Amino acid sequence: MAVVVIVAVVLLLWLVTGVRVVQQYERGVVFRLGRVRGQVREPGVTLLMPVVDRMRKVNVQVVTMPVPAQEGITKDNVSVSVDAVLYFRVIDPIKATVDVQNYAFAMLQVAQTSLRSVIGKSELDDLLSGRENLHQGLEIMLESPATGWGVHIDRVEIKDVSLPDSMKRSMARQAEADRERRARIITADGEFQAAAKLAEAAATMARTPAAMQLRLLQTVVEVAAEKNSTLVLPFPVELLRFFEASAARIADGADATGAAARPVVPAQPPADGS
C-alpha cells in the first residue's frame, strides 16, 4: 500500500511539474527531445511531459523599436542624419524561434541597413516633405526578410532628419529671400491695381467735370469731421487753368491791339540823291 502511495505522489509531482501557463499575449513553442512540435500552444493552461518537453514562450505583441540615427549622403550630395521607428509583431512563433537566433536584433540590423539605403537613393526635399513614399519603400524593403522570420511589419516611420548647421543657415536665407520676393510681388501688384483704379477715376472725372467738384466737397466733409480748428480747403486745379487761359487770351489781345495802333514808317530814299 505504501508503494502505491509513493508511486501516486511521484506521478502527481511529475504531472505538476509539467503544467505551464501561457499568457494571452504569448504563444508557446514546444520542443520534444529537441524537435519542434507542429502545434503552437495557445493561451491558457498547457501540459508538458516533464524532462522530455521544453517550451519557449514567444511574445506576439506589437514591438516598438527605435532605429538609431544613421548618417549618409543624399542623392543631391547633402550630409544628413536620419533616425526612424519600427513597429512589428510575430505572426509565426515557430519561424521566429527556429529560423533566426534573435529576431528583434535581426530586425534592428535590417532596419539600419535599409534606412541607409533609402538615404542614398533620396533627395533632401523627399526626406523633409515626401516621407510617405519613403515609409512605403522602407516597409517593402523590410517585409521580405521579415516574412522568412515569421515577423510582420506594421509600419515604419522616419522620426527626425538632422541637417548640418551650414545647410540650416542656407535654407533659412532661401526661405527669407522667397518671403521677401512674395512681399514685393504683392506690393507691386497692389500698386498696379491702385494705379489702374485711379486712372479709371480720372477718366470718369474728365468726362464729367461736376464729379471733380463733388469730390472736392466730399474731401471738405471728411476734413470737417475731424473737428479741427483749421479747415484746409483745396483749390481746384481747373480754376487755375481757367485763370491761366484767361490771362493768355488777354495778353494775346493786348499784343494784337498794340500792333494795330503802331504807325507805319515809310522807307527813306538813299542819301546820295540819285
Image (tube, rainbow, N blue to C red):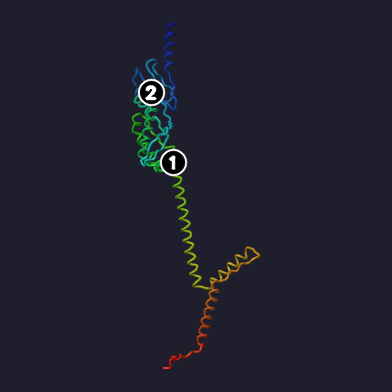
Query: Residue, x 39% and y 15% (percent of image)?
Result: 51
Seen from this angle, which residue lies furthest bottom? 274
Q: Position of residue 135 (x, y in %)?
A: 39, 38
- Compared to residue 221, the image places residue 2 above or below, namely above
Q: Position of residue 208 (x, y in %)?
A: 51, 73
Query: Residue, x 48% and y 63% (percent of image)?
Result: 195
Label 1 sits on a secondary structure element that is helix
Residue corresponding to mark 1: 166
Mark linked to residue 29: 2
Mark 2 surroundings within 10 Å by alpha-carbon count, few (fewer than 14), some (14 through 19), many (20 or more): many
260 or 109: nearer the viewer:
260
- The type of residue carrying mark 2 is Val
136 or 147: nearer the viewer:
136
Label 2 sits on a secondary structure element that is strand
- The type of residue carrying mark 1 is Ser
Query: Residue, x 46% and y 48% (percent of image)?
Result: 176
Mark linked to residue 192: none
Q: Position of residue 269 (x, y in %)?
A: 44, 91
